[in-house]
Amino acid sequence: MNPIRIAPSLLSVDFAHLERGLRSVEEGGADLHHVDVMDGHFVPNLSIGPPVVKAIARVAQRPLDCHLMVTDPLVYGERFAQLGAWGVTFHIEVADDPRQLCDALRAMGVRPGVALNPPTAVEALEPALDHVDLVLVMSVNPGFGGQAFIPEVLAKVEALRGRYGFGKDIEMDGGIGPSTIGACAAAGATVLVAGSAVYGAEDPAARVGELRRLAQAAAVDCT
């Protein structure tokens, strides 16, 4: 099993003090910075765009995990690859040819990932599983931070590990905090995204450490 990694979501950072926020979670041992990119079409919201990602890449000391909630992932994927993204995750709901998209992203030098929304059946991922480095299981409906965790999606993680034998990273994003992260890790998730639970904490660095301990304990208990 891949190691547990904690990826604070910049959707919840105080943008007036962006670099300070980055440093606080890095000091706490964050493994990745999760960058939520929204285009106002695939999801009803706008968020971080290329100029901000360029600025983040200039000062970040952890890899950028870019999650594209957009209708044209190839165009955006190329731009974020050029800006220094470590991984680019697109949604299966907008991927006509997941294999071609993964090949294109890999050729750009980034790890390709595929995401699916809570209403989307796990079977929709089948054409992509042999071509991605990561599967992102959304545990809220995408578009806004601070939503409540949807526990039913844990069955998708279990199916990926069990029925499909998917041995690479499974990421979960949405409503993840101290009360939910253990269930995610026990189901088989290895990359845990937390936004408001980290950046809304009094001590974001300490919260990163707490989340890691809870996830690691749950992952060990389920082996």
Image (tube, rainbow, N blue to C red):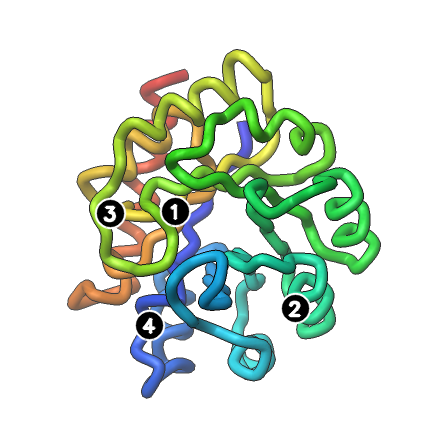
Along the line of sight, the residue nearer the viewer: 211 or 137: 137
Q: What number is the disc on residue 173?
A: 1
Three-letter code, disc 2: Phe
Type of the residue with mark 3: Gly
Q: Quadrant of the C terminus?
A: top left
Q: Is residue 29 visible?
A: no
Q: Which mark is residue 13?
A: 4
User: Which of the marked residues, 2 or 4, is nearer the chain's N terminus?
Assistant: 4
Q: Residue at x 46, y 62 (%)?
A: 36
> Circle 3 sits on which residue?
177
Q: Which residue is rendered at x = 65% and y = 29% of the image?
A: 129
Give the CA distance from mark 3 to mark 4: 15 Å
Gap in angstroms between the C-alphas marked 4 and 1: 15 Å
Mark 2 secondary-structure assignment: helix
Separation of disc 2 and disc 4 at Cα? 20 Å
Q: Is residue 210 above or below residue 64?
A: above
Snapshot quadrant of residue 134 = top right
Nearer to me, 54 or 6: 54
